[in-house]
Amino acid sequence: MFTCTGWLLFAAIAAIGAADAPTAFPSPLDGPGQPALERSQLKPLTKAVSLHAKGRNQKALKQLAKAGPGPAQQLLGLQITYDTVDGRTLRDLQGLTETSPDYAAAWATLFVVADGTAEEEVAYEAAGRVVQLWPGSIWARKADEMQRRHVDRLVAVAERSLETEPPERALADIERALEVDPSNHALMLGQASCLIRLDRLDEAATVLAVIGDDPSALMMAGNVAELEGDLVTAMGRYQAAPLGTPGRDEALRRVKTRWRLSVLPSYVQAALASNQVSREELAVLLVNLVPEVRAMGSGTVPLLTDILDLPSQRDIVTAARLELLSVDRVEHRFDPDRIASGPEIQDAIERLAALVGVPPPVWCGVSNVVSSCMELTAPVDGKDVTDAVLNLVHGEDP
């Protein structure tokens, strides 16, 4: 077996002129993994390489015919007859790299052809083999540059998709980019975000666990736990995020509120889940959603005969004492079973705002409505009241 140092053809091409110059390829006689050649094959093949470098392709093909069959001969033939139109050269080169998987010059030629014909996936794979088989060569450098361009383009596509495309499409683009850049945390966060939007929470949690203690990953992991109803874990994730992490304090306050509500007595849970809020349930929600009102004010405690047997009695008395809800002081009645009207609920929430010292809500449907108006649509349920009160007091929904 003979090996010899080949020539980098692009040096000769520059002297020939752009119009007739062949594409710059590595010599079939250069680089690792060269196939075995008989002496009788080496001489005509070497002449054919030299003639091709000078652009004398017809004579190069005649010399190549004298060299007989073999991987190096096939590679040079494909370089000489390179056709960018019908794709035959690309397919034949793919076949050659399959039968000669360690032939670096064949992989480099495939990389150049695929890159020149916009076959980006093929070029990326071939470039990886060039970097692996022929480190330190000019072809490895070119392959590395191509890989970086490919990765950058896929990442850019994924980032645009995350902002503009439906989650299914964005997820496909992100996962394609992750195939070539698997440790890109920004892409992984985008992947987790799409999975959350698609309600694939277990998969999102797995992705976020790989990222670890990145603040954004911790916040997203807290959100996953919150969506799954695991409020204790959610609190732990949010607390683990560094102070100053955007949204940390708001999320922590929200999940603590939800956890506190989840452990309240059953009659409070019933009010939270009510499909149509009664006056009793409205009083329960106002007092329990903002528990600090229990210690406020010093109004007289009304005698209300129709609440004596209710588990919510203390909450109703508190709401009445603070004049959040009206009572019939003549008949000594609260009328707990009556469905609370929309205006009544709005009035109670406005009174609560004044009591805790926050600006009153701007209700939708009135004059001078702003984009952040609050709306209660009949029938008003427990979630409506809960969202309105917590939004009023904390500035966000629970």
Image (tube, rainbow, N blue to C red):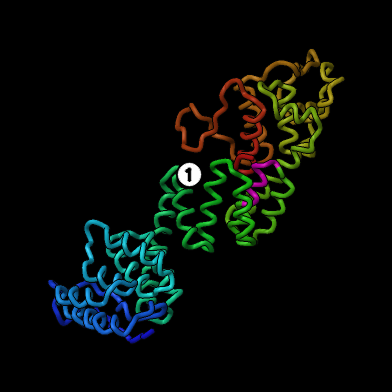
Q: Does residue 123 appear in the picture of this structure?
A: yes
Q: Is residue 122 left or right of residue 195?
A: left
Image coords of residue 16 (percent x, y)? 14, 79
Return the residue nearer the eye: 371 or 37.
37
Residue type marked 1: Pro
Image coords of residue 234 (percent x, y)? 69, 49
Q: Is residue 236 left or right of residue 165?
A: right
Return the residue nearer the eye: 146 or 287.
146
Reply above or below: 136 against 150. below
Quadrant of the image containing the N terminus: bottom left
Q: Which residue bears the numbered disc 1?
A: 167
Q: Does residue 11 appear in the picture of this structure?
A: no
Reply above or below: 304 against 208. above
Reply above or below: 260 against 10. above
Magenta-colored stretch includes residue 325: no
Magenta: main secondary structure: helix
Q: Please give the name of the residue rendered at 57% of the width and 27% of the height, measured from the top-left corner.
A: 376
Q: Is residue 241 left or right of residue 3?
A: right
Q: Residues within 10 Å of mark 1 (few under 14, many from 20)?
A: many
Image coords of residue 43 (percent x, y)? 26, 84
Quadrant of the image containing the C terminus: top right
Reply above or below: 276 against 392. above
What's the magenta region?
Answer: 221-229
Image coords of residue 90 (percent x, y)? 30, 61
Q: Please give the name of the residue rendered at 82% of the width and 20% of the height, measured from the top-left corner.
A: 307
- Examine the image and state in which quarter residue 75 appears: bottom left
